[in-house]
């Protein structure tokens, strides 16, 4: 009987070659989208603390897809929600060491490096998305970002991601700083967050974002300060009774990466990352602005008691907010930005 193994061996080799040929045309799937190449030259692992349902997550994926398309798959951005890359402080430190990591953060955290940047998170500093657009042309902002990059190796790619006004969601109620005394409000641990929340008359309690819901539910805190979209996404109506429309911070978020990684990109790719991040950021910011009233109404319909902005003593809150500027030496920073924006500092 004749042996058939040489024929079988030949067929196997042909099959392997065919498979290898096919694999070269397959697309590589990242968390942010697909790439035409199995081996992109540059990969950015981009993380944030928000859920996959948050509009920002979808926006980051849209940014990733646009970058992949514009670079013909040579830059792959993988998007990781729910703090999958770790604690923010640890991620920022890895970034400073040159890792190919990106992160969504805010001016409060970046103010730990360049103090002046924290002013963007101060009470009643910004008021609208139009002001954010103006800031994108700010020479003062450019100078602060340059210091952040040169001294701390953190590259700002974009700050076009505006979550909008933050309000108080609490089981206690008040309409002025005196009535806020004794109210424990969850906030992030960075100094400007703490000082801004304390300036309302309340007492800031630093808790991780993921512990916010349980913190209110178990009475560790009386409430939290959030945007309407975030409050609805977290189902705050299940644990808090009142919406107090303080509008005390107009929050913008930063997309940052390792300066070393960013500067390793060809200049053309650097421009693409920045432009597409700004495009995606402004688009989602406009979306959130348009949807804010709907989110608010949904919370009211779910049973929350609503105290509107015009029923609060906003002038008293703004006056009290000066304490945050004084505590962190941010008066000159506010003056410099306001001169560019053509704004007056409220007396």
Image (cartoon, rainbow, N blue to C red):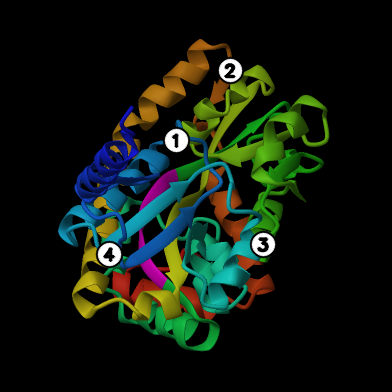
Q: CA distance from mark 2 to mark 1?
A: 21 Å
Residue 92: image location, x then y, percent: 58, 67
Q: CA distance from mark 2 to mark 3?
A: 29 Å
Residue 332: image location, x then y, percent: 51, 81
Residue behind mark 4: 273
Front-most of residues 302 and 86: 86
Residue 341: image location, x then y, percent: 30, 69
Instruction: State which region is magenta.
Output: 156-164
The reply to whether dot 2 and dot 3 touch (C-beta < 8 Å) is no
Q: Is residue 139 visible?
A: yes
- Magenta-drawn stretch, dominant element (helix, strand or loop): strand
Front-most of residues 54 and 217: 54
* Mark 4 neighbour density, 10 Å: few (under 14) some (14–19) many (20 or more): many
Which circle's residue, 4 or 1, is located before the other in the chain? Answer: 1
290 to the left or right of 205: left
Q: CA distance from mark 3 to mark 4?
A: 28 Å
């Amino acid at each position: 009987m004749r042996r058939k193994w040489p024929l079988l061996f030949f067929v196997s080799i042909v099959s392997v070659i065919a498979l290898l040929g096919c694999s070269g045309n397959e697309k590589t799937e990242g968390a942010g989208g697909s790439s035409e190449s199995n081996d992109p030259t540059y990969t950015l692992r981009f993380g944030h603390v928000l859920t996959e349902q948050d509009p920002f997550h979808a926006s980051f994926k849209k940014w990733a897809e646009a970058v992949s398309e514009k670079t013909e798959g040579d830059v792959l951005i993988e998007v990781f929600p729910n703090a999958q890359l770790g604690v923010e402080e640890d991620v920022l430190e890895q970034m400073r060491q040159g890792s190919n990591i990106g992160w969504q953060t805010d001016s409060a955290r970046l103010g730990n490096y360049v103090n002046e940047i924290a002013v963007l998170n101060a009470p009643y500093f910004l008021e609208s998305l139009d002001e954010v657009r103006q800031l994108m042309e700010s020479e003062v902002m450019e100078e602060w970002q340059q210091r952040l990059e040169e001294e701390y190796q953190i590259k700002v790619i974009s700050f076009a991601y505006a979550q909008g006004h933050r309000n108080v969601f609490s089981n206690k109620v008040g309409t002025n700083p005196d009535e806020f005394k004794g109210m424990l409000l969850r906030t992030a641990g960075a100094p400007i967050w703490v000082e801004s929340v304390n300036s309302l008359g309340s007492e800031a309690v630093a808790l991780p974002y993921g512990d916010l819901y349980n913190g209110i539910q178990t009475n560790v805190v009386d409430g939290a300060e959030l945007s309407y979209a975030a409050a609805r996404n977290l189902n705050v109506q299940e644990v808090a009774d009142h919406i107090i429309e303080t509008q005390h911070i107009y929050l913008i978020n930063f997309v940052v990466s390792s300066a070393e990684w960013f500067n390793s990109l060809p200049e053309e790719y650097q421009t693409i990352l920045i432009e597409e991040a700004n495009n995606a950021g402004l688009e989602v910011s406009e979306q959130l602005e348009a949807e804010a009233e709907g989110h608010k109404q949904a919370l009211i319909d779910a049973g929350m008691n609503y105290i509107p902005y015009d029923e609060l003593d906003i002038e008293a809150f703004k006056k009290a907010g000066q304490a945050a500027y004084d505590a962190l030496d941010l008066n000159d920073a506010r003056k410099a930005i306001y001169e560019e924006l053509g704004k007056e500092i409220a007396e």
